[in-house]
Every structure is written in structure tokens, then in C-alpha cells.
Amino acid sequence: MLSKIKDIYDRVSEVNSYYLNNRELAVMDARVKAFGMRVRYFRKLLGISQDDLAEKAGMHRTYIGAIERGERNVSLLNILRLADALEIKVKELFNVDID
Amino acid sequence: MLSKIKDIYDRVSEVNSYYLNNRELAVMDARVKAFGMRVRYFRKLLGISQDDLAEKAGMHRTYIGAIERGERNVSLLNILRLADALEIKVKELFNVDID
């Protein structure tokens, strides 16, 4: 329970840090958006809808939409889940645009 | 402010989902640990300490330690920051073990 609270605290800290530096935020936003575009690219390659991907990855449909628009600071576990659901290796989500 | 609260809510939901399924958790844990080992590998390759990496990445030293031990569900933004600080491409953090 304590570690659960600690995790939540870490995440809240992350959100705070996310709002600290506007210049960094702009650069990071572009890379988060590029990540979202990779997710969308591989979803369309697989020929499935956001609904389908959401179900395969065990996430909510609106969350998939937000990820694809680059509006979510996705966690490692969800990145792994997305790659599994998209039937690709994780590194393919990072292959060109956002390095 | 509303989107900030929404972000925090999403993160808390993520933590909850993290605790739902023990079998998935075991598999995921191995992949999160492999990610941590990649971070440690590249840090040592660069010949810097956890303190140094923490400072370069703008994170806390104990957080770097926890990431390297696979105890943190690192966010996309922090994955990007880590890759920058390690002077590698993001995909290198996902290159072998955890795909």
C-alpha cells in the first residue's frame, strides 16, 4: 500500500515537472506527438480501429485517441502493451521520427 | 488546471491497473527490469555515476536507482530524457531484451 501511494506521488510529481519548463515542453511535445503518430501508423497498418486496439491493449478507446494525438505521457507498461497489441517490437514505435 | 487533474486521474488509474493482474504483472515486471538493465548498461558505457545521470536527465538520484532496478513504470517523457542524457537513440533502450 505504501509503495502504491509512493507510485501515485511519483506520478503527480511527473505531472508537475511536465508543466515546469515551456521550452522543454515544446520540444518534448513534438516527440510525444511523433510517438502518437507511430501508434496510429501501425494501427492502420494492422487495419484495426481505435476501439479494436483499445480492446486488444486493455485500454479505454478515448485513451487510445489521446495517445495518437500526442496528448498523453504514456507509461512504459502501456508502451509495452501497445506494442504487443500492435504486433510489433517496442523499438519500432521509436524507430525514426522521435530519436 | 482541469487537464492537469485529468492527467493525475489517468496516472492513478494506471497505478490501479498495474495492480490488477498478477500473471501479467510478472511478465511485465521482467520487461520493465530489462529496460532498467539497458539504462544501467548505457550509463556504465558512458562511464558516469547514477548521480551524474540524475543531474543530466533532471531527475532524482534515487529515482535513477529505482529505474535501473526495474521498480519504476517510467513515463514516455522520462524515457526521452533518459535517452538524451545517455546520448543514445530511444530505440536503443528497447533494442534486444524486452521486445
Image: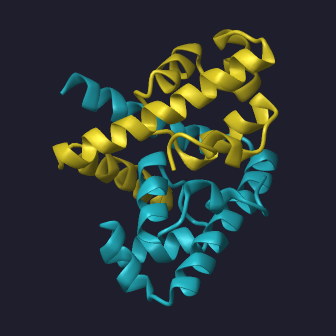
Chain colours: A yellow, B cyan
A21 vs B6: above or below? below
What residue is drawn where x is 76% and y is 19%? A45
- In front here: B51 or B66? B51
Q: Examine the image and state in which quarter residue B37 appears.
A: bottom right
Q: From this viewpoint, is residue B19 visible?
A: no
- Report if residue B78 is visible in the image: yes
Judged left or right of residue A51, residue A86 is: right
Percent from the top left, x then y, of residue B33? 68, 66
Image: B93 above or below A23: below
Using the rendered view, name the quadrant where residue B5 is placed.
top left
Q: Which residue is depicted at the point 61% across and 39% down?
A: A78
Residue A38 in the image: above or below residue A97: above
Identify the residue shown where x is 40% and y is 77%: B53
- Number of numbered discs: 0
Q: Quadrant of residue A83?
A: top right
Up the image or down, A19 lies above or below B81; here it is above
Q: Position of residue A87 (x, y in %)?
A: 82, 33
- Residue A53 horizontal side relative to residue A73, left or right: right
Q: Position of residue B49 (x, y in %)?
A: 44, 88
The image position of residue A69, as x and y in percent, is 45, 21
Q: Most extreme residue toward the front, as rendered?
A: A96
- On the rendered structure, is A17 left or right of B44? left
Residue at horizontal 72%, vertical 59%? B95
